[in-house]
Amino acid sequence: MEDLKNDRHTFVLDTNVLLHDPFAIYKFKEHEVLIPIVVVEEIDKFKRDQSEVGRNARTISRLLDKERMKGNLSKGVPLESGGSLSIIMDTIEHATDPFPNSVNNNDNRILGLAVFHARSTKRKCVLVTKDTNLRIKADAIGITAEDYSNDKVNIDELYTGWCEMTVKSEVLDTLHEERELPLLSEDLIANQFIRLVDENNPEEICLVRVNPEGDRIMPLSQSSNNIWGIQARNDEQRLAMDLLLDTRIKLVSLIGKAGTGKTLMALAAGLQMVIDEQRYNRLIVARPIHPLGRDLGYLPGDVDDKIRPWMQPIFDNLEYILHCNSEELSKSQITHQYFIDKGWLVVEPLTYIRGRSIPNQYLLIDEAQNLTPHETKSIITRAGHGTKIVLTGDPYQIDHPFLDTTTNGISYLVQRFQNQPLYGHVTLTTGERSELAEFASNLL
């Protein structure tokens, strides 16, 4: 969103912006923020919803009521940023000029108000909406329209978690002898991986990581090559396993296309650290049921029956891990239900995460690209003492209607948390599911 500092402008907010980020009213600095009354009416329809949208609807209603205490919202109240907030009556007459044949459409009423306000105040009026078609309609009638981009990140410049450096042979010799190196560049950050390549022998490669304190470079743990029968098949997977097994790293994000092994490695690491090493009390696996918080009562059976269709990919990965772990275990016909019955594993929708405190657990959030930044914050703040949280996702496979590669929760997390001592990230690019899956991921 452009920072319009040369003049005071007016921003008209659409309903979907406030349902996405209730605090958007405070993000426009010294400019005027207008909320059409039809937007307030639409928000009211969502306030009883138990999903994240419903919670955001209740939040924006409380915020508007708080601002109302400062004065008359119809005349505008001052904001701490230096701007102002107003709720404006948009009438059917406002939409008559630009849309004489469809004046009862709420989108057209919002557009009509933007046109009326721009003409009456002679001030630049910008419609802010996450609705692509509404932005197109606004452009067609000469109204500036923008997406809400306060929480956007540049996906092409997103931190990958690792880099490659060419070094002299003496550097690698020192690493092998002393098992550590000083920082090789001021640009390196905490928990970043480096692929060191010998300048005289490109086949000589060593994988290292900056320590959490950000002042030394250390080789990877030798135990990060194999987790519960899951063998790292490429360097990226080795990096991911190193983060997953490091108890100093409390928050891990793994981004990658389908078939790169994100969920499989995260599950295997969770089983090892819960069952074998007993570092955590249990492994909790959750994933958003799209849309987040959908009423599970539409499906027959108890809670376990209701969530099974959504969690089947998790169960498939667990069965594969059991098959790979050992010949004896695979022949014993033990299934994921055995681990659930033992209390080592809990699989549930994200609907039940809010409001909880989760201490000393290994919490895996799958399909995190379907979370908003606010939802991601809500989940991470559930972590109690000793808990490790792992988020996996593919920003290019988003089902949420108002999210994209630049606004989803996992991309936002990577942008904000990089260089934190307790956080690590790896972007995986090489598919290992099958040759066919890799071709499909790259070509389709």
Image: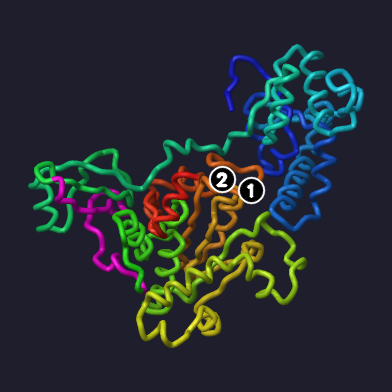
Disc 1 residue type? Answer: His
Q: Which residues are magenta?
A: 202-228
> Looking at the image, is 360 positioned above or below residue 380?
below
> Looking at the image, is 61 positioned above or below residue 220?
above
Q: Earlier in the sequence, mark 1 or mark 2?
A: 1
Q: Mark 2 and mark 1 in contact (Cβ < 8 Å)?
A: yes
Q: Nearer the viewer, residue 100 or 43?
A: 100
Counting from the top left corner in percent of width and height, residue 287 is at 58, 61
Q: Image quarter for residue 308? A: bottom right
Q: Could you tell me how far apart the alpha carbons at marks 1 and 2 are, in whole angstroms? A: 9 Å
Q: Nearer the viewer, residue 349 or 23?
A: 349
Count all numbered tags in the image, as a single digit. 2
- Which residue appears farthest toward the bottom when viewing the image? 332
- Which residue appears farthest toward the top when viewing the image? 122
Q: Which mark is residue 85?
A: none
Q: Can residue 25 be seen in this snapshot?
A: no
Q: Is residue 280 magenta?
A: no
Q: Is residue 213 left or right of residue 46?
A: left
Disc 2 residue type? Answer: Asn
Q: Secondary structure at mark 2?
A: loop
> Looking at the image, is 236 positioned above or below residue 122?
below
Query: Which residue, given by chain and number where applicable, does mark 1 sit on?
Result: 400
- Quadrant position of the N terminus in the picture: top right
Counting from the top left corner in percent of width and height, residue 210 is at 27, 51
Counting from the top left corner in percent of width and height, residue 309 is at 63, 67
Query: Which residue, given by chain and number where applicable, does mark 2 sit on?
Result: 408
